[in-house]
Amino acid sequence: MRTGLTRNCEQVNQGSCYLGTRGSFESAAKRFMEKDLDVSVAGRSFMITGASSGIGKAVATAIAKRGGTVHMVCRNKDRAEETRVEIVKETGNKEIYIHILDLTETHKVWEFTEAFKRKFKLLNVLINNASSMLTQRELNTEGLEKNFACNTLGAYILTTGLIPLLEKSADPRVIMVSSGIMLVKKLRLGDLQSERGRFDGTMVYAQHKRQLVVMTEQLAKAHPNIHFSVMHPGWVDTPAVAKAMPDFHQSMKNKLRTPEQGADTVVWLAVSEAAAARPSGRFFQDRKIIPTHLPLAWTHSSLEQKERFMSLLEELGKAFQPH
Ligand SMILES: NC(=O)c1ccc[n+]([C@@H]2O[C@H](COP(=O)([O-])OP(=O)(O)OC[C@H]3O[C@@H](n4cnc5c(N)ncnc54)[C@H](OP(=O)(O)O)[C@@H]3O)[C@@H](O)[C@H]2O)c1
């Protein structure tokens, strides 16, 4: 069955190979430089949201293998503990810490961010990987739509709250895990809480992934001492895809990337010197900067619209900041 998402993916795919199947990874990997990931990151500290599963878990494992300290930010304690045990067993690295946080709870994101800064004196890399794709509109205790609270505002508060700590650390980097599906969306300012019209969880998610791209560009301009990037992992066989898009998962199953393949560009952006040498604020797939709009697309926004979006996030963030 062709779902709205499948149709949108086809639309994206007609423009280029943004869809990011397993085959396109294997073909892209032929130009990867092996030495880029042949590095030790011992003594460097990495925070990864949604590290209990899928791409986040693969990223955490890859960084642990290279000796980095890993802060796993997860909402489910049992899943997080299980993953930590697996990572320690596989990598021999015991510097893996769990922090329990539901990113849909805005005041908790603030509390966590402030507590982390008090407790830890170092954070070199923040990876905003977690993402929510609730198919029904649900509100958090602050009255914000939960997907937005997690995918956009959660990433914004965590990032801006941790910027002072990142700026004190060497070679600081922030990576946002977006999605190629954002190519079908234009930044929308008028309905951040998805109150209008029929609620389509997939399209709401696509809008949030566009918001992450704009946020990354704008934060990169405002904070030139930090290297920001945003990326599309390709289409990856993870629990999120199987659960939220069963038809898409079924129709694509043999073509989906492994979590390790999906994690490759995140890891490259997080650890390699080559990534830090690229301009800040750009959108990547398969270790390469790619356009944030399809050819001839109607999805461009003006600078004023992008700045207005950032002001709205700042206002919302402040409104729910505990005193
Ligand atoms: N898989 C793909 O094909 C694909 C394509 C494009 C982009 N992406 C992006 O890749 C990233 C990772 O997704 P994935 O495919 O690896 O999915 P996944 O295996 O389901 O992982 C998502 C992670 O986010 C966590 N999470 C969800 N809601 C959360 C919340 N409210 N608070 C804290 N953590 C929360 C999940 O925790 P639980 O274990 O508790 O659920 C899980 O650890 C996402 O940003 C996704 O949008 C994936």
Image: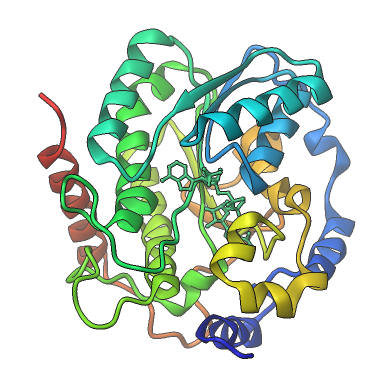
Residue 286 in view of the camera:
yes
- Identified at 36% across, 28% down, the residue is 163
Instruction: Give the vertical position of 247 relative to 87 (above or below).
Output: below
Q: Quadrant of the N terminus?
A: bottom right
Q: Residue at x 44, y 28 (%)?
A: 100
Q: Residue 238 versus residue 95: which sits nearer the camera?
A: 238
Residue 202 rendering spot, x and y as whole percentages: 45, 72
The residue at 60%/46% (across/down) is: 278
Residue 275: horizontal and vertical position, in percent?
65, 42
Q: Position of residue 320 (x, y in %)?
A: 14, 38
Splitting the image into 4 quarters, where does residue 24 fall? Answer: bottom right
Q: Quadrant of residue 235?
A: bottom right
Quadrant hosting residue 80: top right
Name above or below for residue 44 compared with residue 86.
above
Residue 21 screen position, x and y as percent: 75, 70
Q: Is residue 11 above or below residue 203?
A: below
Q: Residue furthest front?
A: 78
Q: Quadrant of the C terminus?
A: top left
Q: Is residue 277 visible?
A: no
Q: Is residue 280 left or right of residue 82?
A: left
Left or right relative to 196: residue 172: right
Counting labels gives 0
